[in-house]
Image (cartoon, grey):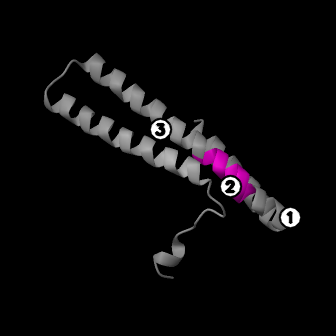
Amino acid sequence: MSEETDVRHASGVDEAGKDRNIRRLRRIEGQVRGLQKMVEEDRYCTDIMTQIASVHEALRGVSRELMRNHLRHCTADAVRSGEARAEEIYEELLDLIYSRTR
């Protein structure tokens, strides 16, 4: 199996949400570069950790948007497609939720 065939794609994408996520991720990228500079400049630890918390919150925002899209499109399509695929998506969601709450 080639690497390209291993890549899964969303069954539907909210284009406005995708655009918001791309903008957010670009801002986060800039924040991370700023963090790197703060570390290089030996900035005060608490200031760096405050900025790290900001990056975490921004990433959580992207994650919420992605979960919303996954539920609206991928999960809904899987449930409509029948019991076997619905069970797969339920297990996938449970794994995702519980792996992120540890």
Q: Is residue 83 left or right of residue 34?
A: right
In the rendered image, residue 2, in percent from the top left (x then y), is placed at 47, 81
In the rendered image, residue 31, in percent from the top left (x then y), is placed at 32, 35
Residue density around tag 3, few if under 14, some if 14–19, many if 20 or more, within 10 Å: some
Q: Specify the amino acid type for callout 3.
A: Leu
Mark number, residue 92 = 2
Mark number, residue 59 = 3
Taking the view exactly as shown, the residue that stands out farthest to the front is 16
Q: Specify the amino acid type for callout 2.
A: Glu
**Dot 2: element:** helix
Q: Is residue 22 left or right of residue 13?
A: left
Taking the view exactly as shown, the residue that stands out farthest to the bottom is 1
Mark number, residue 42 = none
Q: Specify the amino acid type for callout 1.
A: Glu
In the rendered image, residue 56, in percent from the top left (x then y), is placed at 44, 32
Q: Nearer the viewer, mark 2 or mark 3?
A: 3
Q: Which residues are magenta?
A: 66-75
What residue lies at 13% left-to-right and 27% top-to-bottom?
A: 41
**Dot 3: element:** helix
What residue lies at 61% left-to-right and 62% top-to-bottom?
A: 10
Q: Nearer the viewer, residue 44 or 26?
A: 26
Residue at label 1? 83
